[in-house]
Image (cartoon, rainbow, N blue to C red):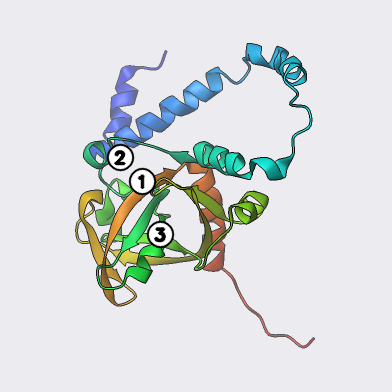
């Protein structure tokens, strides 16, 4: 058994309790996943029989696009009902809608936070300059997003009653917010004052995939040689 003094000494390495609690939560999730790694659910033994009994062996994909999109939304996002009151800081994977009272067209713009968890817990490390990417303009069809969600960079959100697919433009930029509070995120974007409205949060593996692609853009090196 690990001496508890080692645990509390490790706790002292964090500048804030928020950073330590974030570490602790991730550790619990990882431990839970490892504990269940070799456990085979009982449903595995009956799932094939269930498909045969219910005529689900052949499925017309084009007839269930809406359901596939909804499943994609459920699998890739986290709905936290009390997020604005219990954890109101910007987090990695948070999706926001741009609210511009002077230009309604800009309200169709959405931003994805790519600022790492450890930095979000103490945003003074980056002087409150957070990394984001934005969605590409235009209307994206559900069919397109469902078809390309595993190869390209799409997300499904539900800002109102209808599902909305977003295609991300993987070119990161920073925005400064004087106050790191989801209830009042105000800053300047494209030389205009804006407010960000929190919509939902991408699960970490989905957000990390998009983040990896986005920061490739900043490390690209061009060369000029005879060819």
Tell which of 71 and 214 is nearer to you.
71
Tell which of 35 and 202 is nearer to you.
202
SS under mark 3: strand
Q: Earlier in the sequence, mark 3 or mark 2?
A: 2
Instruction: Give the numbered dot on residue 118.
Output: 1
The quadrant in which residue 194 appears is bottom left
> In this rendering, would 90 be left or right of 164?
left
Looking at the picture, does residue 93 appear above or below residue 193? above
Looking at the picture, does residue 93 appear above or below residue 71? below
Q: What's the CA distance linking mark 3 and mark 1?
A: 20 Å
* Point 46% across, 41% down: residue: 77
Instruction: Give the numbered dot on residue 111.
Output: 3
* Quadrant location of the N terminus in the rendered image: top left
* Point 25% across, 66% down: residue: 187
Percent x, y of residue 74 = 50, 37
Percent x, y of residue 72 = 56, 41
* Quadrant location of the C terminus in the rendered image: bottom right
> In this rendering, would 222 be left or right of 32?
right
């Amino acid at each position: 058994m690990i001496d508890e003094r080692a645990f509390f000494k490790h706790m002292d390495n964090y500048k804030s309790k928020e950073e330590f609690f974030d570490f602790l939560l991730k550790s619990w999730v990882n431990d839970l996943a490892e504990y269940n790694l070799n456990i085979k659910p009982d449903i595995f033994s009956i799932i094939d029989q269930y498909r045969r009994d219910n005529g689900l062996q052949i499925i017309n994909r084009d007839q269930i696009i809406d359901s596939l999109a909804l499943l994609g939304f459920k699998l890739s996002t986290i709905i936290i009902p009390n997020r604005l009151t219990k954890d109101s800081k910007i987090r990695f994977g948070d999706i926001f809608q741009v609210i511009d009272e002077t230009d309604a067209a800009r309200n169709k713009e959405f931003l994805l936070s790519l600022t790492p968890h450890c930095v979000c817990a103490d945003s003074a490390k980056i002087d409150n300059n957070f990394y984001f990417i934005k969605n590409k303009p235009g209307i994206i069809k559900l069919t397109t997003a469902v078809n390309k969600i595993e190869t390209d960079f799409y997300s499904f959100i539900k800002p109102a009653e209808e599902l909305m697919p977003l295609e991300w433009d993987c070119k990161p930029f920073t925005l400064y917010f004087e106050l790191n509070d989801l209830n009042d995120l105000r800053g300047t974007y494209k030389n205009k004052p804006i407010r960000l409205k929190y919509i939902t949060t991408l699960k970490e593996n989905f957000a990390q995939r998009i983040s990896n692609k986005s920061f490739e853009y900043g490390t690209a090196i061009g060369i000029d040689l005879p060819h």
